[in-house]
C-alpha cells in the first residue's frame, strides 16, 4: 500500500463511523427523540442519558445522531449535487469557450452576485421549509463556485500536450472531457468539495436556526444549537455537543478530501514541510580558519567530493581542478550530478542535500585556501557573488520580475562594495554595456520581461560578473537559447575570458559541441561519477572511456548513416550497478567491470579515465 | 486516392494571424505567425522545418495537422481540403495524421496507464477488434523498443526518452500516413536523442511515412530529413534538398544559422565575427521589405523595396533573397 493510501485510513474510518451511525439511527437502541421528560429538563449526563437532557427533557445523544442525519444529508447532498452541476458547466465552458462559456460559467456567475443567505431565503420562502427545498437552495448557491474552479482548472489542462494529442487522435470532444480532462481537474474539485460540505453545514444550521430549514420537532444540529442558545446560562453543555459534532465532522471531511487528493495523484509526493521541521545536518558546519595557500595553487581543487541526500549518494568522489584563466566544461546527461557539483561550489545545494565527503579547496583573492565543502553559510556568503558567482540556465526565472535590471545589478554590487549614487549608476551602465546590452543608459531601467531571451541572459551574466569574480560557474547558460543567440552568448563568454585573464570558469552543459567551442579542459560525468577528464581537443580526438566515445558518436554530425545510440538509460541513484556504473550499457564490459569499480587511470600526463579497458576503447 | 506521385499533404499560401490587443481599449494589432507558406510532403518523405523560436514553425505544424485553422490559404490532405470537412469527418481523417510533441513530460496524461493511452487511438478508430487491443498495444510497445509490461504503468515511472517512445507508439497506434514531430528530441539527452532519431528513421523506412520534422537542431534535421525548409519570421526563406540547403546554403540566413551551430570540430576562431548580430524582430512589427534585412550582412537598399519571392536556385531548390546564390561555406563537418 502506498503511504498516501495509508494516510486515508484515519479520516476514512472516522467518516465511515459517522455515516454508519447516522444511517443506522433507526435500528440503534436510541431513545425517542420526541419523548419529553419535563421534570428532568436540563439534566446533566447520566447513565440513562449519556449526554444529558435538553430543555424538554429529551435525550441529547439520540437527538444529536438523528440531527446529524438531517444535517449531513442536506450538506453532503447539496455538495454532491452542486459538484455535478458545477463541474459539468465548468468543463463545458472551459473546454469549448466562446458562446458555451457565456451560457455556462458566466450565467452561473450571476448567482454569485446575490447575497448567499438571501438567495437561500428566497428559495425556501417560495418552496416552503423542509429538507428538499433546502438542498435545492444550497445546490443553486454552490454551483457557481464549482463551475468557476473547474473552469479555471479546465482552461489550464486543455492547453497541455496530452489533450492536444487526444484531439489529434480524433477523439470525440465529450470523450476527451470525461476521460482526459475530468481526472486532471479532480484535485481542485476535491478541495472545493470539502469547503462546500463545511459551509453547507454552517448555512443549514443557520437556516434551521432561523426556522427555515428542518421543521421542529425533527432534530438537526442547527436547531439544537438554536435551542441551546436560549438556555446557555442554565445548561452550557447543551451548546457544546452539537457544536462539537458540527466542527468535528467538518474537520474530518476536510482531512479526508486533502488526503484523497494526494492519494489520487499518481506521482509520489516528495517529503517536504517547513524548513525547521526537516532534519538538521548531523555535523553542523563550523567556521573554518583559513590557511595560506601555497603559491601556484590552482583556483579550485575539488578532490573526492561526494554529495548525498539522506543515505543516497548522488555524486560520488568527484575530483576537478580549475586553474586561473582556465575554462573547464562539466559534461553529462541529466542525472549525472553535474549541476549539483556546480551548486555545491556556491553553497546553494537544496536543503536536503549535503556534501558528505572530500574537499573543495578554493584559493581566495588574498591567497588563503578555504574548503568550500566545510565552510559555514556566513563564510560562503562572503565569497558568493564576490569571488565565486553563478549564471543559471533560465534567466527568466532567475531574475526578479518586479525589480528593474539596473536595481538588481546595484544590489549585487552593493552586497560586496561600499558604493552608491552616481558612481554606482555609472558602474551599472558600464557593466550592461560590457555584456552587450544595447543602449544601456536607458535599458538599465527595464524590467526583466521587457528584455528578450538573449538580453535577459546577458543581464544575468552582468549580474554574475558584477564584482569581477575569480570563479564563474555557468550552468547550461545557452541551452534555452536559439542557435544565433547561443552563438552570441558563447562569443560573450569568450570575450569575458579574454578581458579578465585570471578568471576561471566551470561551464556545465550537456552539449558536446558547445564544449568544443568554449572549453580548455573537459570533465565527463556519468551517474554521479567523473568518468573521464582531459584537454578538450585530446579527449574529443581520442576518448579513453567508452561513455565519452559513445557520447561523441551519438552527435549527428559525423555523417554516418545511423547514429550510435547508447542502449538503456542512466541508472537511478537507488539502484546503482555494483561495479562500473556504465557497465550495463557498455559495449566493452567484461565480468570484471560488473564486479569492481574501476580506479582512475592516467592514459597521458593530464588525462584521467575510469575504465579497466581504456586501452581498447580507441 | 490520387495518383502515386501527388503529395500527400499540401499547404497553399498558408497564413495565420493572432491579433493582439494592447490595453483595454487598444486597437487590435495583426501578428502574423505564419505568412504565405506553401509546402508539400509526399509519402516516404521527411521534411525538416528549421528556424528560431518565434519563426512560426510550430504554428505551421499545428495547421498542417488540422489542429489550428489557417487565417489565409488552404490545407489539403490526400486531395481533400481540411477547411471543407465537418468536425466528424475531420476526426475520422485524423486517424491518418498524428503528432509527436516536444515535451515528453507534458504529452502523456499523468493519471492513466500507458496501455490505456495507446489503446485510445485503437478504440476510437476501431483499428483492431476489441479483443485484440491488448495484443496490438503490446506489438506497438515492442515496435518502439519498450517491454510489453510497460502497458500497466503510468508515465511518471518512465524516463524522458522512454516517454518519447511511448508518445511515438501512441502516434503510430492509428496507423497514420503522416506524422508531425514538433521538436521531438530537443528535450532529451544526447545519447537518448540518438535512440529516438534512429527509431524515427526506422519507422519512416518500414512504414513509408510522410513526416514533418520541426526542430531547431540543424544536425538532427540534416541527419533525418530529405528536404529542408528554413523559416524566418513566419516566412519560408529557403527550401530544397537537405544536402543542397545545408551543403551550399544560398540564403544568408541559412548560412548564419549554420555558422551559429556549435560543432564538435570548431572552426577557425578568426571566423568568429560571423556571428549574426541582433535578434529576431517582433512579428507584430516586421521590417519592411525582406524580413531578414535588419540582421543580414549582405543587406542593401533594394532589400527594403519588397518581400523577395521564393525563386528557384536549382532543381527543387528555392530561396527568397535577391542575392541568393549557393555558397560552399559554413558547413558543419
Image (tube, helix red, strand yellow):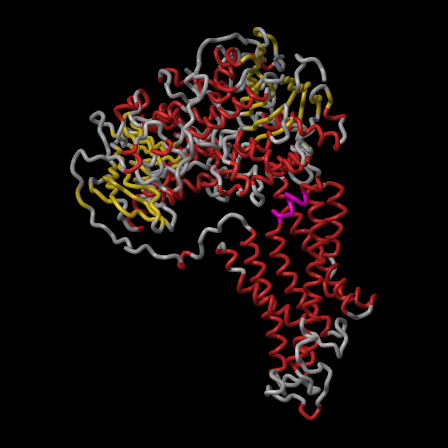
- Where are the magenta residues, as a range? A177-185
Q: Residue furthest bottom?
A: A39
| Coordinates of residue B47 in the picture (x, y in percent) | 57, 19
Residue at (62, 24) in percent of width and height: B178
| Coordinates of residue A128 in the picture (x, y in percent) | 82, 69
Q: Is residue B279 at all visible to an observer of this figure?
A: no
Q: Residue furthest top?
A: B314
Q: Is residue A41 at all visible to an observer of this figure?
A: yes
| Coordinates of residue A51 in the picture (x, y in percent) | 61, 82
For the image shown, how many numbered marks are present on the structure? 0
Q: Is residue B195 above or below residue A557?
A: below
State the predominant SS element of the stretch in magenta. helix
Q: Is residue B188 above or below residue A246?
A: above
Residue at (61, 9) in percent of width and height: B311
| Coordinates of residue A102 in the picture (x, y in percent) | 75, 45
The answer to whether residue A367 is left or right of residue A245 is left
The answer to whether residue A598 is left or right of residue A103 is left
Q: Is residue A603 above or below residue A572?
A: above
Q: Nearer the viewer, residue B291 or B160?
A: B160
Picture quadrant where residue A474 is located:
top left
Q: Nearer the viewer, residue B137 or A567?
A: B137
Queried whether the magenta region covers residue A178, the answer comes back as yes
Residue at (46, 27) in percent of width and height: B195
Queried whether the magenta region covers residue B29, the answer comes back as no
Quadrant the C terminus of chain A occupies: top left
Q: Residue furthest front?
A: B131
Amino acid at each position: 500500500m502506498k503511504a498516501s493510501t495509508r494516510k486515508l485510513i484515519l479520516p476514512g474510518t472516522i467518516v465511515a463511523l459517522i455515516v454508519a451511525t447516522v444511517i443506522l439511527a433507526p435500528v440503534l437502541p436510541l431513545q425517542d427523540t420526541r419523548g419529553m421528560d419535563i421534570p428532568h429538563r436540563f439534566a446533566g449526563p447520566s447513565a440513562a442519558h449519556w449526554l444529558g437532557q435538553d430543555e424538554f427533557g429529551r435525550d441529547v445523544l439520540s437527538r444529536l445522531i438523528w440531527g446529524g442525519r438531517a444535517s449531513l444529508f442536506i450538506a453532503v447532498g447539496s455538495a454532491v449535487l452542486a459538484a455535478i452541476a458545477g463541474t459539468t458547466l465548468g468543463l463545458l465552458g472551459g473546454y469549448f469557450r466562446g458562446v458555451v462559456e457565456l451560457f455556462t460559467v458566466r450565467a452561473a456567475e450571476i448567482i454569485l452576485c446575490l447575497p448567499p443567505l438571501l438567495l437561500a431565503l428566497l428559495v425556501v420562502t417560495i418552496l416552503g421549509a423542509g429538507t428538499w427545498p433546502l438542498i435545492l437552495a444550497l445546490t443553486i448557491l454552490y454551483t457557481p463556485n464549482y463551475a468557476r474552479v473547474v473552469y479555471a482548472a479546465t482552461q489550464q489542462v486543455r492547453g497541455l500536450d496530452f489533450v492536444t494529442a487526444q484531439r489529434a487522435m480524433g477523439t470525440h470532444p465529450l470523450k476527451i472531457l470525461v476521460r482526459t480532462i475530468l481526472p486532471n481537474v479532480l484535485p481542485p474539485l476535491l478541495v472545493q468539495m470539502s469547503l462546500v460540505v463545511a459551509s453547507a453545514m454552517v448555512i443549514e444550521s443557520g437556516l434551521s436556526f432561523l426556522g427555515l430549514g428542518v421543521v421542529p420537532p425533527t432534530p438537526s444540529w442547527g436547531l439544537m444549537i438554536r435551542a441551546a442558545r436560549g438556555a446557555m446560562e442554565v445548561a452550557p453543555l447543551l451548546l457544546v455537543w452539537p457544536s462539537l459534532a458540527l466542527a468535528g465532522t467538518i474537520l474530518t471531511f476536510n482531512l479526508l478530501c486533502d488526503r484523497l487528493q494526494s492519494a489520487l495523484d499518481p506521482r509520489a509526493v516528495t517529503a517536504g514541510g517547513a524548513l525547521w521541521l526537516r532534519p538538521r545536518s548531523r555535523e553542523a558546519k563550523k567556521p573554518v580558519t583559513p590557511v595560506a595557500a601555497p603559491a601556484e595553487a590552482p583556483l579550485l581543487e575539488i578532490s573526492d567530493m561526494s554529495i548525498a541526500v539522506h543515505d543516497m549518494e548522488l555524486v560520488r568522489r568527484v575530483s576537478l581542478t580549475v586553474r586561473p584563466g582556465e575554462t573547464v566544461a562539466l559534461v553529462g546527461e541529466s542525472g549525472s550530478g553535474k549541476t549539483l557539483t556546480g551548486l555545491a561550489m556556491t553553497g546553494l545545494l537544496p536543503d536536503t542535500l549535503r556534501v558528505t565527503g572530500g574537499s573543495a579547496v578554493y584559493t581566495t583573492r588574498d591567497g588563503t585556501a578555504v574548503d568550500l565543502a566545510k565552510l559555514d553559510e556566513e563564510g560562503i556568503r562572503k565569497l558568493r557573488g564576490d569571488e565565486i558567482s553563478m549564471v543559471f540556465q533560465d534567466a527568466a526565472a532567475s531574475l526578479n520580475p518586479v525589480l528593474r535590471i539596473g536595481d538588481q545589478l546595484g544590489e549585487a554590487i552593493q552586497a560586496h562594495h561600499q558604493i552608491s549614487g552616481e558612481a554606482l549608476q555609472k558602474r551599472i551602465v558600464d557593466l550592461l554595456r560590457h555584456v552587450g546590452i544595447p543602449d544601456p543608459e536607458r535599458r538599465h531601467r527595464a524590467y526583466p520581461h521587457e528584455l528578450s531571451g538573449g538580453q535577459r541572459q546577458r543581464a544575468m551574466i552582468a549580474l554574475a560578473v558584477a564584482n569581477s569574480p575569480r570563479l564563474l560557474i555557468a550552468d547550461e547558460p545557452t541551452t534555452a537559447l536559439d542557435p544565433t543567440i547561443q552563438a552570441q552568448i558563447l562569443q560573450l563568454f569568450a570575450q569575458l575570458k579574454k578581458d579578465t585573464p585570471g578568471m576561471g570558469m566551470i561551464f556545465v552543459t550537456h552539449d558536446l559541441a558547445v564544449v568544443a567551442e568554449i572549453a580548455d579542459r573537459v570533465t565527463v560525468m556519468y551517474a554521479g561519477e567523473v568518468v573521464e577528464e582531459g584537454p578538450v581537443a585530446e579527449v574529443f580526438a581520442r576518448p579513453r572511456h567508452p561513455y565519452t566515445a559513445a557520447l561523441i558518436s551519438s552527435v549527428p554530425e559525423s555523417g554516418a548513416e545511423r547514429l550510435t545510440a547508447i542502449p538503456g538509460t542512466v541508472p537511478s541513484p537507488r539502484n546503482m550497478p555494483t561495479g562500473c556504473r556504465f557497465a550495463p550499457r557498455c559495449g566493452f564490459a567484461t565480468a570484471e567491470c560488473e564486479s569492481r569499480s574501476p580506479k582512475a587511470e592516467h592514459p597521458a600526463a593530464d588525462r584521467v579515465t575510469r575504465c579497466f579497458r581504456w586501452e581498447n576503447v580507441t | 486516392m490520387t495518383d502515386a506521385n501527388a503529395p500527400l499533404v499540401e499547404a497553399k499560401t498558408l497564413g495565420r494571424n493572432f491579433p493582439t490587443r494592447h490595453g483595454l481599449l487598444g486597437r487590435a494589432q495583426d501578428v502574423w505567425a505564419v505568412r504565405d507558406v506553401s509546402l508539400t510532403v509526399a509519402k516516404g518523405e521527411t521534411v525538416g522545418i528549421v528556424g528560431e523560436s518565434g519563426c512560426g514553425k510550430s504554428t505551421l505544424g499545428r495547421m498542417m495537422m488540422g489542429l489550428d485553422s489557417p487565417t489565409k490559404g488552404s490545407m489539403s490532405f490526400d486531395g481533400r481540403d481540411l477547411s471543407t470537412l465537418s468536425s466528424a469527418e475531420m476526426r475520422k481523417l485524423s486517424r491518418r495524421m498524428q503528432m509527436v510533441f516536444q515535451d515528453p513530460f507534458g504529452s502523456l496524461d499523468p493519471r492513466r496507464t500507458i496501455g490505456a493511452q495507446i489503446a485510445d487511438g485503437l478504440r476510437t478508430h476501431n483499428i483492431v477488434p476489441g479483443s485484440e487491443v491488448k495484443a496490438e498495444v503490446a506489438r506497438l510497445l515492442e515496435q518502439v523498443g519498450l517491454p510489453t509490461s510497460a502497458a500497466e504503468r503510468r508515465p511518471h515511472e518512465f524516463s524522458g526518452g522512454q516517454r518519447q517512445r511511448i508518445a511515438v507508439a501512441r502516434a503510430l497506434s492509428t496507423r497514420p500516413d503522416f506524422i508531425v514531430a514538433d521538436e521531438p528530441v530537443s528535450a532529451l539527452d544526447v545519447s537518448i536523442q540518438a535512440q529516438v532519431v534512429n527509431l524515427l528513421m526506422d519507422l519512416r523506412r518500414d512504414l513509408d511515412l510522410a513526416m514533418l520534422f520541426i526542430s531547431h537542431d540543424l544536425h538532427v534535421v540534416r541527419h533525418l530529413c530529405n528536404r529542408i525548409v528554413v523559416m524566418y519570421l513566419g516566412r519560408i526563406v529557403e527550401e530544397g534538398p537537405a544536402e543542397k540547403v545545408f551543403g551550399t546554403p544560398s540564403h544568408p540566413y541559412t548560412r548564419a544559422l549554420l555558422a551559429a551551430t556549435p560543432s564538435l570540430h570548431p572552426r577557425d576562431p578568426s571566423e568568429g565575427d560571423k556571428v549574426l548580430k541582433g535578434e529576431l524582430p517582433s512579428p507584430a512589427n516586421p521590417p519592411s521589405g525582406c524580413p531578414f534585412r535588419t540582421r543580414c550582412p549582405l543587406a542593401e537598399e533594394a532589400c527594403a523595396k519588397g518581400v523577395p519571392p521564393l525563386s528557384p536556385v536549382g532543381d527543387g531548390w528555392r530561396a527568397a533573397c535577391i542575392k541568393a546564390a549557393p555558397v560552399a561555406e559554413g558547413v558543419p563537418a
